[in-house]
Image: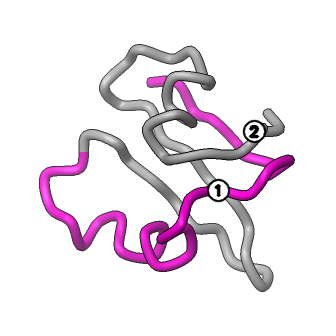
Amino acid sequence: MVFGGGTSEELVLAGGCTDPGATYWVTSDGRLIGYLPTAPFGAVNAGWQALFSEGLPANTPVLVRCG
């Protein structure tokens, strides 16, 4: 999907997947950076949080895996 911009929480809502196993992926410098909203530890999403500490920019391409 192409996300219109906003917080990671808004991305999850826009993705339309309610499965707790959903994951979201973006590319940065040739690497895949993942986001697992239900991660039990903050370290799981550390790369995502570092990349999007101020939210995702408009028109960010995101690969969504639902479940």
* Of the image marks 1 and 2, the number of the one nearer the N terminus: 2
Tell whether label 2 touches label 1 (CB within 8 Å): yes
Residue at the location (23% across, 49% down)? 39
Q: Which residue is mark 1?
A: 56
The number of numbered discs placed on residues in the rendered structure image is 2
Residue at 52 percent across and 47 percent down: it is 7
Looking at the image, residue 19 lies above or below residue 44: above
Magenta stretch in the rendered image:
39-67
User: Residue beneath label 2, please?
Assistant: 3
**Vertical placement of residue 29 versus 33, above or below:** below
Residue 47 appears in which quarter of the rendering? bottom left
Q: Amino acid at mark 1?
A: Leu
The answer to which quarter of the image holds residue 20 is top left
Q: Nearer the viewer, residue 40 or 60?
A: 60
User: 28 or 4, which is in the foreground?
Assistant: 4
Left or right of residue 56, residue 59 in this image: right
In space, the residues marked 1 and 2 are separated at their CA atoms by 8 Å
The outermost residue toward the bottom is 29
In the rendered structure, the answer to whether residue 23 lies left or right of residue 37 reads right
Q: Position of residue 52 (x, y in %)?
A: 55, 67
Label 1 packing within 10 angstroms: few (<14), some (14-19), many (20+)? some
